[in-house]
């Protein structure tokens, strides 16, 4: 299965949140993992923010950042192209959709256009409900 790894799922894996084992298993079982350049920024910013707010130690953030960085060479990172920006401006089946979520959905749709079926790996109900409403599969139970 080709999987689009969205930020919420990756943060569950990196920070040990609920469903982290499910996310890790899905990443490990995937034939191919895709994500957006946006994901890299989001994940790294969450780590910086968590340290700044005292929600995560510097050491824990460094460990999470290292684990994330170690996986990136095996994943395909999609740039956010003009086509993706323009699709993100359009309505989605289950509105309202936040801007960054629209960019993730648009990125995954573009990758599915090119590669065929792409399953969404996300723990965000807004993203998953839209992905399923678009007739696309989820990588996990949702």
Image (cartoon, helix red, strand yellow):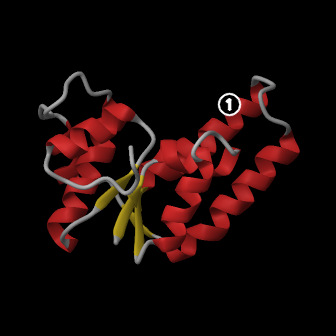
Q: Position of residue 101 (x, y in %)?
A: 34, 36
How many numbered marks appear?
A: 1
For image coordinates 23% across by 48% down, the residue present is: 106
For image coordinates 21% across by 45% down, the residue present is: 132
Secondary structure beneath dot 1 equals helix
Q: Where is residue 138 in the image (x, y as percent from the top left)?
A: 31, 53
For image coordinates 18% across by 71% down, the residue present is: 116
For residue 133, side relative to residue 32 (left or right) = left
Q: In this view, does 139 lie above or below 141?
A: below
Disc 1 target residue: 49
Residue sitting nearer the eye, 79 or 43:
43
Q: Is residue 36 above or below residue 92?
A: below
Where does the C terminus fall, quadrant-wise? top left
For image coordinates 62% across by 37% down, the residue present is: 46
Residue sitting nearer the eye, 40 or 121:
121
Residue sitting nearer the eye, 13 or 101:
13
Q: Is residue 23 above or below residue 105?
A: below
| Residues packed near mark 1 inside 10 Å, few (<14), some (14 to 19) or many (20 plus) | some
Q: Where is residue 41 in the image (x, y as percent from the top left)?
A: 53, 46
For residue 59, side relative to residue 12 (left or right) = right
Where does the N terminus fall, quadrant-wise? bottom left
Q: Position of residue 133 (x, y in %)?
A: 16, 41
Where is residue 47, by image quadrant?
top right
For residue 65, side relative to residue 117 (left or right) = right
Question: Which residue is situated farthest in the front direction here?
Answer: 141
């Amino acid at each position: 299965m080709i999987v689009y790894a969205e930020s919420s799922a990756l943060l569950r894996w990196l920070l040990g949140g609920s469903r982290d084992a499910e996310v890790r298993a899905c990443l490990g079982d995937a034939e191919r993992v895709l994500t957006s350049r946006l994901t890299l920024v989001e994940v790294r910013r969450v780590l910086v923010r968590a340290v700044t707010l005292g929600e995560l130690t510097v050491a824990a953030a460094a460990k999470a950042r290292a684990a994330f960085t170690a996986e990136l060479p095996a994943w395909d990172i999609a740039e956010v192209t003009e086509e993706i920006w323009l699709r993100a401006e359009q309505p989605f089946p289950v509105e309202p959709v936040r801007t960054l979520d629209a960019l993730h959905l648009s990125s995954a749709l573009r990758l599915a256009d090119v590669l065929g079926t792409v399953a969404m790996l996300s723990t965000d109900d807004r993203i998953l409900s839209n992905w399923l409403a678009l007739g696309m599969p989820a990588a996990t139970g949702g």
